[in-house]
Amino acid sequence: MTEAYIVDAVRTPTGRRGGGLSSLHPADLLGSVLQALVDRSGIDPGAVDDVITGCV
């Protein structure tokens, strides 16, 4: 069985429909979240096999 680790939780800013974040692609927002996780935790990005994200 593969082991899973929860390293930290980070979220993107929230915005309104057609607001300041509307021009950003979701992948770009996710990239900033992943970079923040790496910066905050000090984890080696090469050690990450999968990332599971969600939208609530």
Image (cartoon, grey):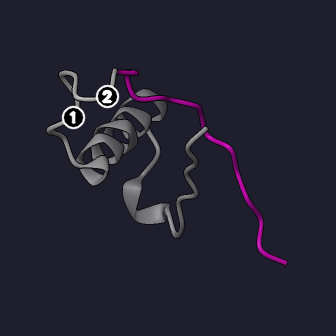
The image's mark for residue 22 is: 1
Are the residues flagged by discs 2 and 1 in contact, CB closer than 8 Å? Answer: yes
* Point 29% across, 53% down: residue: 27
Q: Please state, as top left, top right, bottom left or bottom right, where the C terminus lies in the image.
A: top right
Spatial CA distance of label 2 from label 1 is 7 Å
Residue matched to label 2: 17
Amino acid on which disc 1 is placed = Ser
Name, please, the residue furthest toward the front: 18
Residue stretch rendered in magenta on the structure: 1-15
In the figure, is residue 50 to the left or right of 39?
A: right
| Closer to the camera in the image, 44 or 27 | 27
* Point 55% across, 51% down: residue: 53
| Closer to the camera in the image, 5 or 10 | 10
Q: Nearer the viewer, mark 2 or mark 1?
A: 2
In the figure, is residue 55 to the left or right of 26?
A: right
Q: Please state, as top left, top right, bottom left or bottom right, where the N terminus lies in the image.
A: bottom right
Answer whether residue 6 is magenta in the image. yes
* Point 50% across, 29% down: residue: 10
Residue 33 coordinates in the image, percent (x, y): 38, 37
Q: Secondary structure at mark 2?
A: loop
| Residue 36 in which image quadrant | top left
Name, please, the residue furthest toward the left: 23
Residue 17 coordinates in the image, percent (x, y): 31, 28
